[in-house]
């Protein structure tokens, strides 16, 4: 028997209440507007490159660790579960989840921090804004426009954070940061799904790499609670299998709490349209206090014991050195980049000054995979 699909909530985003695209297009014949967005993201060059961009570990260190691609798929899976339970738009939620990391640099946050330092005199670098830049401008697949021409709502979800200064340059898309309003619920839940996936899968990868220990994690009450439940059900389980079950249990518990808490908040507000959601001063999608505390405790543990581990620190320093060296070399001589990028940088520089040329350099570096950044850096060292 076919599953019955429940109607969307009146405050969910639909093709009918969407604010549309920057460049008007005919509606798709057999897809929703947000299925079209999702499909455009999946077919983009930037999405394919996520396979070779890392979360914490450098790509060549092992093929079992998460990449930005596997992370994005896991975020989409979690987000769709929440969207379906809350009668929100699953296709929009998926499109946001798959697109949210398109602007990430090679070498994870280490690369992002290094590129931000390099660009500090030229407006800085922030991966959410870069993801928006990718889908609005940098992808070149269509004859009628630059970028992917995604819907307003997908672009809104990609832009999770934004300074007031940058928001003022983004027109309608940046207005909510100035007026302190909220995005739609689909964008809010994609943001929390990202947090759930990120924390719990870094736990899994950190344990696999033996950079953190299960005993250390068990000092977190939430983890200890899930561990006790796993051992109660499977007393003879191996440690490796126990880790999988614990991570699975933590994700399940967090997702269940997110759905229950968020639904209660929405029901208390009783919104009639998406504009009632946007008018709120704080997000409606969120955890209860105990589960919010659990998430923060996991994040704090990872920050202190995984991200500051000597091995990760060494990789971080090396990654920052590589990104910085690439930036300095390309800004000094645009011709060291491939012809297409060098020409774009020269034209931007001549038209709008050094900052514009530096932005093209940042675009080029941000688009690199870990492996390509390493190879390019090595080639520069040989004087090529």
Image (cartoon, grey):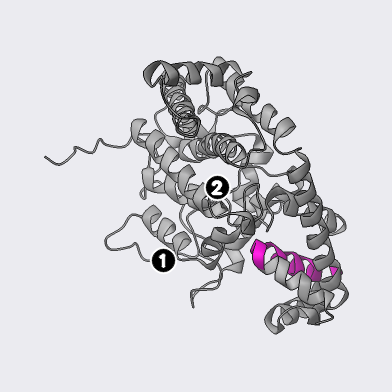
Q: Residue at x 65, y 46 (%)?
A: 56
Image quadrant holding the N terminus, namely: top left
Q: How far, Cα to Cα, is label 1 from label 2?
A: 19 Å
Tell which of 304 and 213 is nearer to you: 213
Image quadrant holding the C terminus, namely: bottom right
Q: Is residue 128 above or below residue 381?
A: above
Task: Find residue 25 and name its label.
Answer: 1
Q: Is residue 41 above or below residue 158?
A: below
Q: Secondary structure at mark 2?
A: helix
Task: Find residue 261 and name its label.
Answer: none
Task: Find residue 156 and name its label.
Answer: 2
Q: Which residues are magenta?
A: 354-371
**Coordinates of residue 322 in the picture (x, y in percent):** 79, 62
Classify residue 287 as left or right of residue 160: left
Instruction: Report if residue 352 is visible in the image.
Output: yes
Q: Residue at x 64, y 18 (%)?
A: 219
Classify residue 79 as left or right of residue 323: left
Q: Residue at x 56, y 58 (%)?
A: 50
Q: Secondary structure at mark 1?
A: loop
Answer whether labels 1 and 2 touch (C-beta < 8 Å).
no
Does residue 282 show up magenta in the picture? no
What secondary structure prevails in the magenta region? helix
Instruction: Report if residue 355 is visible in the image.
Output: no
Q: Nearer the viewer, mark 1 or mark 2?
A: 2
Of pointers 1 and 2, the one earlier in the residue sequence: 1
């Amino acid at each position: 028997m076919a599953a019955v699909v429940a109607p969307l909530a009146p405050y969910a985003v639909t093709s009918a209440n969407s604010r549309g695209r920057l460049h008007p297009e005919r509606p798709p014949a057999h897809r929703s507007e947000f299925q079209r967005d999702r499909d455009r993201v999946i077919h983009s060059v930037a999405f394919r490159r996520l396979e070779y961009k890392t979360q914490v570990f450098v790509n060549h260190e092992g093929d079992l660790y998460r990449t930005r691609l596997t992370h994005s798929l896991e975020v989409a899976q979690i987000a769709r579960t929440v969207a379906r339970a809350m009668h929100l738009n699953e296709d929009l939620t998926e499109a946001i989840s798959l697109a949210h990391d398109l602007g990430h640099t090679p070498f994870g946050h280490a690369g992002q921090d290094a590129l931000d330092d390099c660009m500090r005199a030229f407006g800085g670098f922030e991966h959410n804004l870069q993801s928006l830049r990718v889908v609005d401008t940098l992808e070149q697949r269509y004859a009628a426009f630059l970028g992917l021409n995604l819907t307003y709502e997908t672009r809104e979800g990609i832009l999770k954070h934004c300074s007031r200064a940058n928001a003022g340059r983004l027109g309608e898309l940046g207005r909510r940061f100035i007026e302190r309003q909220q995005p739609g619920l689909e964008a809010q839940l994609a943001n929390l799904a990202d947090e759930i996936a990120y924390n719990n899968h870094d736990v899994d990868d950190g344990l696999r790499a033996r950079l953190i220990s299960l005993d250390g994690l068990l000092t977190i009450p939430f983890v200890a609670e899930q561990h006790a439940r796993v051992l109660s059900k499977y007393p003879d389980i191996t440690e490796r299998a126990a880790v999988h079950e614990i991570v699975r249990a933590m994700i399940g518990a967090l997702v269940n709490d997110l759905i229950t808490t968020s639904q209660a908040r929405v029901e208390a507000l009783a919104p009639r349209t998406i504009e009632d959601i946007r008018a709120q001063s704080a997000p409606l999608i969120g955890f209860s206090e105990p589960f919010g505390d659990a998430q923060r405790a996991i994040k704090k543990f990872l920050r202190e014991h995984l991200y500051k581990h000597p091995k990760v620190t060494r990789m971080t320093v090396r990654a920052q050195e590589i990104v910085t060296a690439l930036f300095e070399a390309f800004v000094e001589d645009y011709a060291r980049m491939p012809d297409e990028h060098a020409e774009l940088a020269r034209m931007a520089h001549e038209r709008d000054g050094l900052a514009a040329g530096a932005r093209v350099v940042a675009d080029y570096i941000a688009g690199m995979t870990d492996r390509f950044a390493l190879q390019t850096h090595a080639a520069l060292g040989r004087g090529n």
